[in-house]
Amino acid sequence: MKHKVLITGANSFIGSNLTRKLVQEGFEVHCLVRENSDKWRLEGLNIKFWIGDLRERESIFEIVKKINPDIIFHLATAGIYAGVEGNEKDILDINFFGSKNLIDACDEIDYRCFVNTGSSSEYGIKNRPMNEDDVCSPMNVYGISKNMACKYGQMIAKTKNKPIVSFRIFSPYGAYDHKDRLMSYALVNALKEEDIVLNNPYGVRDYIFIKDVVELYLRAIDNAEKAKGEIFNVGSGNQEFILNVVEEIIRISNSSSRIIFGEYKPRSYDNKIWVADMNKTKEFFNWKPKKNLKQGLKESIEWFKNNLERYSNETS
């Protein structure tokens, strides 16, 4: 019998890659999306769409009951792209209260696995690799909201014995990325032979290829029961200067793009160290990234080259 999967945020960057992999693996996939959501990342897939809003508690309870999923991957989020914070009320309402509504709705069904998607922004400023046992001190409302959802899922897992785990995602990149994110911006401009403006060239990130991220979500299915209430970092364990990554993109794509240093506007959550301690994740899931940065960039460049027109409109 096919496992029935409910995915929130299925039309997002990570969500669409995960949805595509699940369909490929033969899962019955149900996608919760908001009305008028742009679903181009999911074109051609044999999936069932459910129109709903995580903030509408009664509706979410009804949808979850109708689907009765075995597996829940929660990726819907409101947050930050290109350093611009969204509406703080929406961030809290969707990231925390929406997550709470979904977790509570699932309390009424018997499920095998629930993966909540958190963020490295939960940690705040650290002077060493970020570890799951660190005290979290978020530096913005987005990080606070994601940490609240993570803690709520952890509490329900431990008090009600539910197979809920949380993944703290660092900096994924690859196919179907949002065009407002730095990596896709650099990839697109390099392929268009256009200048790439960097406001924070010596900022650091822990980049992880999207297919390696998806692999971890799949491994959670068979491990959520013994990992209930646990939090896992999802990164490469390597930190890179943004400037070095963009230079590598230009080199691999054989682009004539110039790097322009823009005006640096310091943010409270910029840090000289931003890297995941991946020991717990690697040991528990017997996992390690299959692609290093150079390999992942090569594959990403090929995908963006074949889908460049998608990134010329305003809805990507």
Image (cartoon, rainbow, N blue to C red):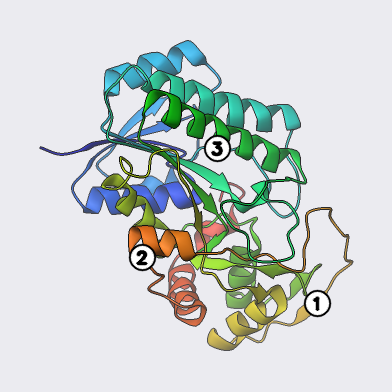
CA–CA distance in space, label 3 to label 1: 38 Å
Which residue sits at x=43%, y=69%? 303
Which residue sits at x=62%, y=39%? 147
Residue denoted by label 1: 260
248, above or below 7, in the image: below
Judging depth in this view, the residue of 92 and 29 nearest the camera is 92
Judging depth in this view, the residue of 274 and 84 nearest the camera is 274
Q: Position of residue 94 (x, y in %)?
A: 59, 29
Q: Tag 3: residue type?
A: Cys
Residue denoted by label 2: 287
Looking at the rendered structure, the secondary structure element under dot 1 is strand
Residue denoted by label 3: 150
**Disc number lying in front (3 or 1):** 3
User: CB of mark 2 within 8 Å of CB of mark 3?
Assistant: no
188, above or below 285, in the image: below
Q: Position of residue 178 (x, y in %)?
A: 57, 54
